[in-house]
Image (cartoon, helix red, strand yellow):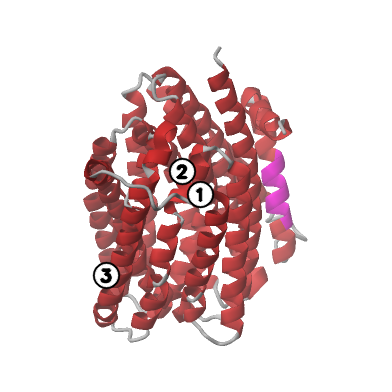
């Protein structure tokens, strides 16, 4: 075996450990931040910022323009591409900021909320600042320096949450969510430039811009469609529900989606550079994706289903009746969202093979399906209908795309099904046992005792099920964390 695959594998394993630790830290920070913000802010504050994100999230998809993925495809010659990539990224970041500022009054009118203009403009300032870090981030990922990325990302999350809490305590309401973005983006740009500043004064040829634009455009279109889907529920809710109702949903989605986004996002950040290096070894690429999918499935499913099981007693314990209207949404979304996780990894295989058009087509087909389901759900049962529709979409379409991608690469449907349904089944049984034990006399009348019982029984039962039926998977998880 060549030295390169061994080195890449070691870096990927190290990267996985660093980013898992970052995910755990980030989840802890995010959880405690959510608790504090839920006490400092009202549901309508969550609702207003959720509507603001429908504009800024979609606009921010333009900032990277897919340049980071194109650069990672050219790891060996990245030094010759960083100058045009930097200027192109910065120019698009400035255009993104101006576009958001122009859209701000229209969004305020569309959602009948004057405060939206200021929120969108505050977030817009971060766009060119984020663009400054695009090329340095790509260089660091190409070097597979996941220790640096994990360390900074943990700081980034901590700083963002700390500033949000400080601004909320100062009485800035929804602005507490918006104002930290430009501050944290400026810190990120400075930090990443100190670590891996791009060369901005090199001469470059017009064909390089054409290449970046041509290869980035499909990535841009794909990301834009993804963001249109990710904000579609809020767009619909902004038109049919009150700001308070949107706030309950935003709180629930933010709470439910964290483990999926952190675990899936971090695993993808580790896997993609390795897949790019294995570009001429398709069998190794597929093997890496299978390993990542299997590991991710057995980690994210128990986390999310346990979250659903703890929603009722946990939120009541922490907030009393204040956020209980969000509990059904937390349960529904926590059950549906984990089925999206594996598609992050399989989509990275398409990107590593430069199959950007195929990835775009999958997203283009999924977007109208999502909007049809969400609009129908909203029409039938308002916010509850939207929550059910979103959960069903993520249960159906992302797994379908993963099936299509992996079947094309010779993986059997049974293998793919295992990644979803075996960990989901084990997790469902484990959480069910936890909920059953939580109804015991002496436990059912105490939110705290119920949380302890559900968490403890779920963890013990899940590990026992793995030991009984998938000992190899249990050993793989343990070995991952033993390797230092």
Q: Quadrant of the N terminus?
A: top right
Q: Provide residue 389's location: percent of width, then percent of height.
A: 34, 56
Q: Quadrant of the C terminus?
A: top right
Q: Does the stretch in magenta take in 206?
A: no
Seen at 36% across and 42% down, the residue is 81
- Taking 221 as reference, is 115 left or right? right
Q: Is residue 298 above or below residue 53?
A: above
Q: Is residue 83 visible?
A: yes
Seen at 49% across and 76% down, the residue is 179
Residue where numbered disc 1 is placed:
260
Seen at 29% across and 72% down, the residue is 98
- The kind of secondary structure element at disc 1 is helix
Ranked by sequence position, the earlier of labels 3 and 2 is 3
Residue where numbered disc 3 is placed:
99
Q: Which residues are magenta?
A: 452-460
Residue where numbered disc 2 is placed:
341
Ranked by sequence position, the earlier of labels 2 and 1 is 1
């Amino acid at each position: 075996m060549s030295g390169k695959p061994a080195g890449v594998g070691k870096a990927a394993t190290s990267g996985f450990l660093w980013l898992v630790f970052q995910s755990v830290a980030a989840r802890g920070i995010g959880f405690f931040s959510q608790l504090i913000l839920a006490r400092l802010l009202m549901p309508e504050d969550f609702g207003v910022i959720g509507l603001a994100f429908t504009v800024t999230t979609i606009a921010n998809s333009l900032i990277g323009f897919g340049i980071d993925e194109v650069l990672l495809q050219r790891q060996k010659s990245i030094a010759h591409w960083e100058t045009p990539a930097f200027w192109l990224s910065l120019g698009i970041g400035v255009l993104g900021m101006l576009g958001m500022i122009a859209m701000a009054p229209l969004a305020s009118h569309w959602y009948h909320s004057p405060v939206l203009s200021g929120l969108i403009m505050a977030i817009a300032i971060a766009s060119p600042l984020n663009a400054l870090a695009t090329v340095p981030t790509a260089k660091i990922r190409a070097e597979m320096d996941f220790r640096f990325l994990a360390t900074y990302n943990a700081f980034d999350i901590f700083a963002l949450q700390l500033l949000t809490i400080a601004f909320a305590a100062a009485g800035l309401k929804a602005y507490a969510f918006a104002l930290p973005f430009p501050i944290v983006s400026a810190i990120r740009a400075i930090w990443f430039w100190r670590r891996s500043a791009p060369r901005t004064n090199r001469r470059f040829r017009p064909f390089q811009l054409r290449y970046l634009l041509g290869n980035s455009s499909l990535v841009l279109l794909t990301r834009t469609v993804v963001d249109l889907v990710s904000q579609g529920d809020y767009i619909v809710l902004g038109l049919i529900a009150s700001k308070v109702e949107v706030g309950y949903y935003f709180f629930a989605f933010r709470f439910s989606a964290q483990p999926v986004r952190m675990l899936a996002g971090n695993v993808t950040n580790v896997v993609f550079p390795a897949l790019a290096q294995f570009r001429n070894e398709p069998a190794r690429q597929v093997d890496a994706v299978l390993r990542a999918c299997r590991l991710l499935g057995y980690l994210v499913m128990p986390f999310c289903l346990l979250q659903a099981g703890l929603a009722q007693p946990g939120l009541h314990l922490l907030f009393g009746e204040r956020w209980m209207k969000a509990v059904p949404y937390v349960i529904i979304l926590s059950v549906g969202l984990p089925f999206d996780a594996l598609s992050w990894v399989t989509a990275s295989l398409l990107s590593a093979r430069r199959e950007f058009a195929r990835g775009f087509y999958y997203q283009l087909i999924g977007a109208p399906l999502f909007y049809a389901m969400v609009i129908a759900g909203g029409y039938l049962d308002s916010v509850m209908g939207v929550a059910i529709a979103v959960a069903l979409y993520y249960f159906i379409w992302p797994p379908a795309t993963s099936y299509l991608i992996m079947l094309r690469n010779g993986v059997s449907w049974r293998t793919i099904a295992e990644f979803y349904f075996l960990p989901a089944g084990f997790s469902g049984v484990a959480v069910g046992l936890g909920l059953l034990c939580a109804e015991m006399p002496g436990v059912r009348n105490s939110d705290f005792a119920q949380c302890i019982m559900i968490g403890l029984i779920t963890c013990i039962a899940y590990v026992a099920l793995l030991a009984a039926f998938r000992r190899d998977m249990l050993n793989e998880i343990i070995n991952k964390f033993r390797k230092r």
